[in-house]
Amino acid sequence: MSRALRIGIVCPYSLDVPGGVQSHVLDLARALRALGHDVHVLAPGDETAAHPDFVTVAGRAVAVRYNGSVARLTFGPVAYARVRRWLAERDLDVLHLHEPIAPSLSMLALAVADGPIVATFHTATERSRVLSAASGMLRPMLEKITARIAVSPLARRVQVEHLGGDAVEIPNGVDIEHFANGGFLPGYPRPGVRTVGFIGRFDEPRKGMDVLLEALRGMTPSPGPGVVRLLVAGRGDAEGLLRRAGPELARRIDVLGAVSEEDKAAALRSMDVYCAPNTGGESFGMVLTEAMAAGAPVVASDLDAFRRVLDGGRAGELVPAGDPDALGAALEALLADPGRRAALTVAGRERACRYAWPVVAASVLRVYEAAIAADPRRLAVRDPDDALAAESATGSRIDRPKGSRIDPRRASSTAPRAGFRGDSRIDSRID
């Protein structure tokens, strides 16, 4: 960009609970600020908790079943008023909404704002009854989006099939320095012990913890790898996990619980192998890029999203999803082969550099530039007398004021195309 932009980014999920979208939003904001842009973030969150100075929280969230998981969202009249006030107090050049179809702040901001609007889609649920049922009601409002981003081919396909339009593919980013540099967890590495690691919500079935437990039970004890222990970081019922593992395996499991970003990086550096036994529903695989940046060799399920991140298996081992025998064999072979682990560490770190935040942020800025070129007005807030609540409740169309938006197809012919509805996709993927 030839000038500094004033950018607003809205996250639908609570910052009080770690998650991939939340991390993406905060890290993108930091990367854009490092490039000299004025960035403001709005998200659900506890107003008494500590947050970066560029973050405004819109109050506590409510746990809701969404996209095969439990999401913590904020909605209702109070949230609506806070979104309006946040937008009105900032003279933004562009508004960037994440997951605008989630019933939370991003959807409210989309209803309220007019002007250059960019939306990023993270969802990877191919068959969604919610999306199918809501697409007709949401589509008129989604037409306000000037440019769309999807974090993976699967996220793009879901967005296109359920909601229409198209999107440019720009992946999640990773803070290479944060994960590559620093020490280990206290007491690591352990002499005579090989550590298999897992990070994530281990009570959530699609994360594959039960597959990993079965794989570890079936591994043949051997003097080569030494004692194999499982290191688990993430949210869930630790006592329930140990009961599921059984007495013998439970003695070889260390559960850290929820960890800070600093401890997560230290945990990844402390692992001999990082394992992602997920069974499906993954849009990208951010933790894989973090593991690779930290130097942990990766064994992962052969899902479309993971295969792309691991360069088709050149930067990590891929095994059939849901197959504990194949997973156990891959872990056993890798733990017994230090040369292969070293080679995967090198390949993984090289691969992770493709997802470094400066690279990703530059791609996002190109989409902002295209959105501003297509709709060069400053961002505006709708009339507060607009009957948004009644229209949303009835599912009726929320019309834009006549003449309030420049049609992208009639914008300057020299402006880049950025995934406008009906347009072809920009080929700016990071391969």
Image (cartoon, helix red, strand yellow):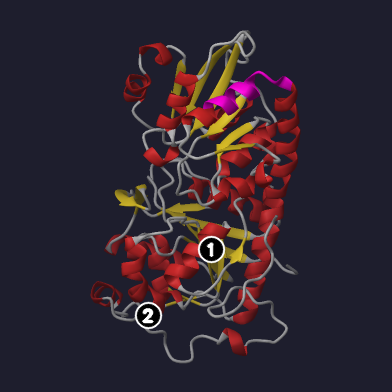
Residue 78 horizontal side relative to residue 160, left or right: left
Residue 415 horizontal side relative to residue 389, left or right: right
Q: Secondary structure at mark 2?
A: loop
Q: Splitting the image into 4 quarters, where does residue 129 fall?
A: bottom left
Majority SS type along the magenta span: helix
Q: Position of residue 169 (x, y in %)?
A: 61, 62
Residue 89 horizontal side relative to residue 262, left or right: left
* Distance between the alpha carbons at the discs numbered 1 and 2: 33 Å
Q: Check residue 48 for magenta coloring.
A: no
Residue, disc 1: 156
Q: Position of residue 141 (x, y in %)?
A: 40, 76
The image's mark for residue 296 is: none
Residue found at x 44% / y 31%: 211
Residue found at x 68% / y 31%: 295
Q: As shown in the figure, which amino acid type bears the numbered disc 2?
A: Asp
Residue, disc 2: 383
Image position of 274 with respect to 107: above or below: above
Q: Is residue 101 visible?
A: yes
Q: Mark 2 or mark 1, which is nearer the start of the sequence?
A: 1
Question: In which quadrant will I find the C terminus?
Answer: bottom right
Q: Secondary structure at mark 1?
A: helix
State which region is magenta: 328-338
Estimate how packed mark 2 is, as few (under 14), some (14 to 19) or many (20 or more) residues with alpha carbons within 10 Å: few
Q: Position of residue 374 (x, y in %)?
A: 61, 81
Residue found at x 61% / y 90%: 410
